[in-house]
Image: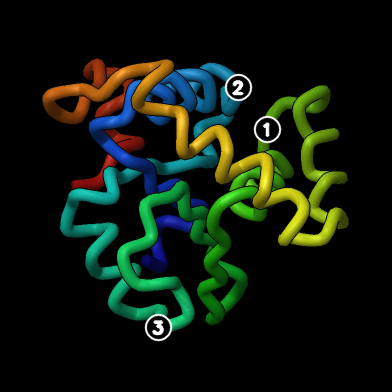
């Protein structure tokens, strides 16, 4: 992952996840974030390198290259850490990274439990536009 310093792994068939990726694309005008669906080969490779990721995790995963070290965050931590790289106003979300994970993840898990009911499930991953294509990995 040496060419991808910041990677967002997301559920490619989740309506909420799709909307979130669209939102991230709009709020990352410098194009620092890259994206790959959890159902793809990039996610399988990353998850295979990190036994600390819970088996069968169906959550957003944020992967950050820090020198030679690859750091992974999931659930609420992923959201808070990747918000550090968004436009100025949205960086305030990163302050919540100081909230204990068990508390922040309660809210995250509630939303995750309802996401298919509220935002639906897609038949397949969205095809990125030609402008976005370079930011998506298989």
- From the viewer's perspective, is residue 138 above or below residue 98? above
Task: Measure the C-alpha gap from mark 2 to mark 3.
Answer: 31 Å
Image quadrant of residue 121? top left
**Residue nearest the viewer, comparing 25 with 18:** 18
Q: Residue at x 54, y 57 (%)?
A: 74
Q: Secondary structure at mark 2?
A: loop
Q: Residue at x 87, y 45 (%)?
A: 95
Question: Which of marks 1 and 3 precedes in the sequence?
Answer: 3
Residue position for label 2: 27
Q: Is residue 38 left or right of residue 25?
A: left
Which numbered disc, 3 or 1, marks the residue closer to the eye?
Answer: 3
Question: Which of marks 2 and 1 precedes in the sequence?
Answer: 2
Query: Could you say where residue 65 lies in the image, as x and y percent from the top left?
Result: 54, 66
Residue position for label 1: 86
On residue 122, the disc is: none
Residue position for label 3: 51
Instruction: Tell which residue pokes out farthest to the left in this image.
Output: 123
> Which class describes the residues within 10 Å of circle 2: few (<14), some (14-19), or many (20+)?
some
Q: Secondary structure at mark 3?
A: loop
**Residue nearest the viewer, comparing 31 with 27:** 27
- From the viewer's perspective, is residue 47 above or below residue 64? below
């Amino acid at each position: 992952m040496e060419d991808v310093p910041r990677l967002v792994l997301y559920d490619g068939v989740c309506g909420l996840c799709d909307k979130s990726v669209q939102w991230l694309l709009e709020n990352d005008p410098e194009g620092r974030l890259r994206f790959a669906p959890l159902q793809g080969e990039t996610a399988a490779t990353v998850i295979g390198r990190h036994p600390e990721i819970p088996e069968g995790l169906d959550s957003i995963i944020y992967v950050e290259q820090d020198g030679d070290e690859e750091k992974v965050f999931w659930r609420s931590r992923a959201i808070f850490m990747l918000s550090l790289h968004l436009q100025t106003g949205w960086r305030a979300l990163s302050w919540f990274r100081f909230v204990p994970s068990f508390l922040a993840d309660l809210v995250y898990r509630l939303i995750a439990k309802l996401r298919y009911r509220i935002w639906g499930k897609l038949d397949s991953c969205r095809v990125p536009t030609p402008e976005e294509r370079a930011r998506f990995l298989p």
